[in-house]
Amino acid sequence: MSAMHTFVRVVETGSFSAVAREQSSTQSAVSKQVAALERHLGAKLLTRTTRMLSLTDDGERYFEDARRLVAEVMEAENQLRRGEQQLTGWLRVAASAGFGTRVLRPHVHSFLTAHPSVKVDFRLNDGFIDLVEQGIDVAVRIGNLADSTLVARRIGTTRLAVLASRSFIASMTAQRPAPQIPADLQAHPCIVYTELRTRNLWDFSTPDGSTASVRVEGPLQTNSEEILRTAVVDGLGIAYAPTWLFQDLIASGDVQILLAGWQPRPLPINLVSPPERRRAAKVRAFADHLSAALADCPACR
């Protein structure tokens, strides 16, 4: 099982040296474990060159079953160690920097309080990360999911709005009327958040079923929610953004919502996990905890 686990992580990371670091071992020792597994099976699993690793046909067939078995054995051992009720060990959680800081952080803290034997490795990153390669147990993803082998659970909804700072609106309306319909946005500088699939094509609908899409332009685009927030506060332009990112500023009136009556399409909030981790008790407990917490978040339902 040890050699099988090593083989699985070598394939997931694409690197003997990365697994050696994980195991506080050497690249040579990791290579020997995989070679011993190949001898035991009587089959070559990996083709190794100086630049890359690739699975053989036998390796392809063996890998998925090996990954599932390793995950099931690890979970069985964890259940035995913790008993029926106790959750223990590391839970690796990933989220975007803005959502992780402004929404998720207090709920991670309350989860740790409720489960003192669990430790959370909380990783915040704007942009795509490979959950398998990074060893992530569960990640928060906002937006419609691409087809993948990841297992998803919807836990909430992100409300979007067209927003600008109070000072920007004051200077804007001194020169021209405030936008009343989506097409009016083309006459104003807009800030584009590139992690949205539609980027600078902003979609809207009305309660009576009307729809509109408008392509906008402006001085700044960014993949960072925090940079987007700062740019709005600094008066660089109008944003199409999650309301949770500006909740405090909307409440104070420093940021205001434009285009009343035209609503951006909301986006789902999903928890996603690699299939071999979906049944882990820690993952299930965290998903239940976060789902209940977001039910009380006005910007996430």
Image (spheres, helix red, strand yellow):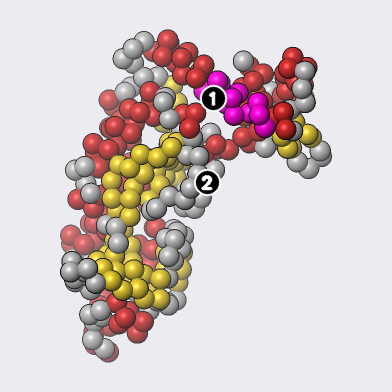
Q: Secondary structure at mark 2?
A: loop
Q: Residue furthest right?
A: 50
Q: Secondary structure at mark 1?
A: helix
Say whether disc 2 or disc 1 marks the residue closer to the N-terminus.
Answer: 1
Location of residue 166 in the rendering, given as x and y in whole percent from the top left corner: 23, 73
Residue 170 can be seen, yes or no = no
The answer for how far apart the CA atoms under marks 2 and 1 are is 21 Å
Q: Is residue 64 magenta?
A: yes
Which region is colored magenta? Answer: 60-71
Q: Quadrant of residue 117?
A: top left
Eye-nearest disc, 2 or 1? 1
Up the image or down, 154 lies above or below 180; here it is above
Numbered mark located on residue 210 in the image? none
Identity of the residue drawn at 31% across and 74% down:
212
Q: Quadrant of residue 80?
A: top left
Q: Residues within 10 Å of mark 1 (few under 14, many from 20)?
A: some
Magenta span: predominant SS is helix
Identity of the residue drawn at 55% across and 36% down:
132
Location of residue 250 in the rendering, given as x and y in whole percent from the top left corner: 21, 62
Location of residue 269 in the rendering, given as x and y in whole percent from the top left corner: 34, 47
Up the image or down, 158 lies above or below 136; here it is below
Q: Quadrant of residue 134?
A: top right
Up the image or down, 254 lies above or below 63; here it is below
Front position in the image: 94 or 271: 271
Numbered mark located on residue 129 in the image? 2
Front position in the image: 243 or 52: 52
State left or right for residue 260 relative to residue 288. Answer: left
Q: Give the labeled residue for mark 1.
A: 68
